[in-house]
Amino acid sequence: MSTSLLLLADTHIPARARRLPTAVLEAIEAADVVVHAGDWVDAPTLDLVASRSRRFHGVYGNNDGPELRRRLPEAARFTVDGLRFAVIHETGPARRREERMDELFPDTDVLVFGHSHIPWDTETPAGMRLLNPGSPTDRRRQPVCTMMTARAHAGVLEVSLVPVDRSR
């Protein structure tokens, strides 16, 4: 038995897009666990994602106001199929990120983060996996908008970066 996950961050609705793309909504409904690493911007997007998720974990980001900060933590922790996850919006500069995260999250197997809108998949010196799904609505300097899907099974996580078509 395995568990499917959807990793999202930086949706920025309605600032960067009017709505979540259809592919994101379909992925939410298909996933066993949905993770959002902050910068929602509006509460209705949180409500939509949480209501369509079987299991949901999310945090607030630097662009999220008082209502979202009341409803979401700055950091979240949970376990899926023996893997210890943490979620946070910002990790600081890319330089020495892996070493800093090892210090801040010593009991974590997978850290999901956002903020940069740049997809990221690396491993720290201590073996923690760092994942940034990019943004499904604001590609910034990236060629396309993105999200990540993952499958957890017996302590192993297989991850795919998925391009998102914002037009549908």
Image (cartoon, rainbow, N blue to C red):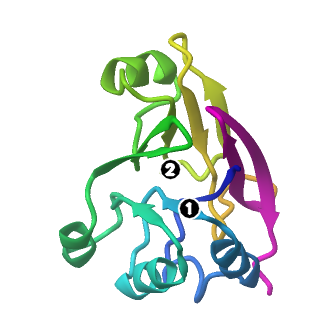
Q: Based on the picture, tell me whether residue 56 belongs to the magenta stretch.
A: no
Q: Position of residue 140 (x, y in %)?
A: 65, 58
Q: Is residue 139 above or below residue 68?
A: above
Look at label 1 and name its amino acid.
Answer: Val
Q: Earlier in the sequence, mark 1 or mark 2?
A: 1
- For image coordinates 43% across by 71% down, the residue present is 40
Q: Nearer the viewer, residue 103 or 91?
A: 103
- Residue 97 lies, with reference to residue 33, above or below; the image says above
Residue 85 place in picture, x, y as percent: 46, 40
Mark 2, other Cα within 10 Å: few <14 / some 14–19 / many ≥20: many
Residue receiving disc 1: 33
Residue 157 belongs to the span the image colors magenta: yes
User: Which image quadrant is residue 27 in?
Assistant: bottom right
Secondary structure mostly seen in the magenta stretch: strand
> Which stretch is magenta?
144-168
From the image, which quarter does the C terminus lie in?
A: bottom right
Q: Left or right of 118: which side holds 49?
A: left
Q: On screen, 78 above or below 21?
A: above
**Cβ atoms under marks 1 and 2 closer than 8 Å:** no
- Residue 10 is situated, as x and y percent measured from the top left of the image, at 52, 63
Q: How far separated are the C-alphas under marks 1 and 2?
A: 17 Å
Residue visible at 33% across and 58% down in the picture: 62
Q: Which residue matches tag 2?
A: 114
Give the amino acid type for the residue marked by disc 2 in the picture: Gly
Q: Nearer the viewer, mark 1 or mark 2?
A: 1
